[in-house]
Amino acid sequence: MTAVLPAASPAARSAHWRRPDARTLLVQCGWLAAPLGSAALTALATGGRMGQGAWITLGAITAAFIVVAAFGAARWSRTRYRLTDDSLVLRSGVFHQRLRTVPLERIRSVDLTATPAHRLLGLTVVRAGTSASGGGQGEIALNAVSRSEGQRLRSALVAKADRHSLAGDPVLARIDWRWLRYAPLTFWVIGGVGVAAGTVYRVLDGIGIEPWRVGFVQRAFTEFGNSMLWLTVPAATLAVVAVGSLGALVLYTENWWNLRAEWIDDRTLAVRRGLLTTRAVTIERARLRGVVLREPLLLRAAGGATVHAVAGGLGDVEETQRRGALLPPAPRARAVRVAAGALQLPRPPFEGADFTPHPRVALRRRTMRGLLLFVLPVTAALGILGALLTPVLLHSAWVFALVAVPVVGLLARDAYGALGHALSGRHLLVRSGTFSRDTLALERDAIAAWTFTSSPFARRAGLVTVTAAVAAGEHGYRIPDLAEETAASFAATAAPGIIEEFLHDA
């Protein structure tokens, strides 16, 4: 945990104070790229004839730069840190001086991150996650230090772990570029194109260009509408998939370049990866509480999976997803081996486990949910638009319903077939999901509390969702649609000593 102290300890006073690298000030100017780029595009689009509004924008950018640069310089000059034999001390603040001391034994992970700007300047950001559950007080960050200083700090911060020999190969995974074939098998292949298109639209709109008024854009939409839709719609879909697949390959390469996941010793797991933005994360074994084998629908169809660590001290849920990734989309057999290696077991507990199926009524709930939340709204929207605009959409409505109903039924059966829970030694096992089938192996002694929730419809069906609260990972893992009469007894067996008194009172 991070303590705010009025004065440093005697051990801290014996260390030498250091200052972040001065090149940090150049990195802080990176925000200028977007507004200056917009101004440059405006100048190019107008042939250099910039109006009064553009000059006002440039003046505002200049004023903001002066203010931000001055504040950044003041913050840099007031920031100091030092590493003692037992703690990491950070002093910072411009208007309010703050002293933070983190005992080394409470540091659970060390993350070295370098964006392209940091790498260009030879810098890195050091983030040390502590035993706090997450958020600002659960992390101490140095932005930024030289690359050599970052390596020195990382080595010193993890040196407190005892060194022991490991049984087997300590290296869990190295990048294999044959895995690139799995990169396009995510829903971001299409979603990523939408995000990119939205970003381009906002940039153009910000510099005064309305994309829908551009001549070639209007002509393209006119031709698209006048052409044979049974040809143009598949062609457009293929184009989007092709562009999205290319983007997925680029992102896969950038994120997982030079991947190496290994046990430095039997108490410290290290993961290094990244091309433009490099990342080096270390996780203490005592904070590694489990793993999640994640199999998105398309990736599962191709026999692939990813692995994420369930660990404390990695930050909030979003940071945990990013920093806890152990393996990119890869063959499932390799993912299973990585999961076993992360748990330091010969094989993961969920392989060969006897999962308890959930009540049959859970299948009906999933079917009705798909029909009411997907099929019915889309069919109704197409029918209404067809009645108002063109009979073509009326035909589209019944064709969509005819196709969507059996698809929803198949997906509901797949989701129900994935439902299961079990106990295997010291691990709680949970499996659920269809668009992303997740199999969780969670240490039972990490469970701090149970939450039982049930909607009115679920109560009528005799089902309850149980959530295990954990000071790691996403901080809560759901076991959906358990039988109401067995949920409490299963929770009491999985993590004894939490709900027994409530069962006795009942």
Image (cartoon, helix red, strand yellow):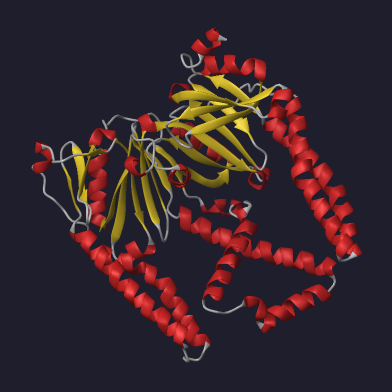
Looking at the picture, does residue 311 appear above or below residue 53? above
| Residue beneath the point at 16% across and 53% down | 18
Can residue 21 be seen here? The reply is no
Q: Position of residue 271 (x, y in %)?
A: 40, 45
394 left or right of 63 in image: right
Can residue 48 be seen here? The reply is yes
Q: Quadrant of the C terminus?
A: top right
Of residues 215 and 290, which is closer to you in this image? 215
Q: Quadrant of the N terminus?
A: top left
| Residue beneath the point at 87% across and 48% down | 402
| Residue beneath the point at 48% across and 37% down | 474
Picture quadrant where residue 218 is located? bottom right
124 left or right of 243 in image: left
| Residue beneath the point at 43% across and 50% down | 259
Q: Residue furthest top?
A: 504
Picture quadrant where residue 21 is located? bottom left
196 left or right of 97 in image: right
Of residues 461 and 57, which is closer to you in this image? 57
Q: Position of residue 496 (x, y in %)?
A: 48, 14
Number of numbered labels in the structure image:
0
Q: Position of residue 396 (x, y in %)?
A: 86, 58
Q: Position of residue 490 (x, y in %)?
A: 58, 17
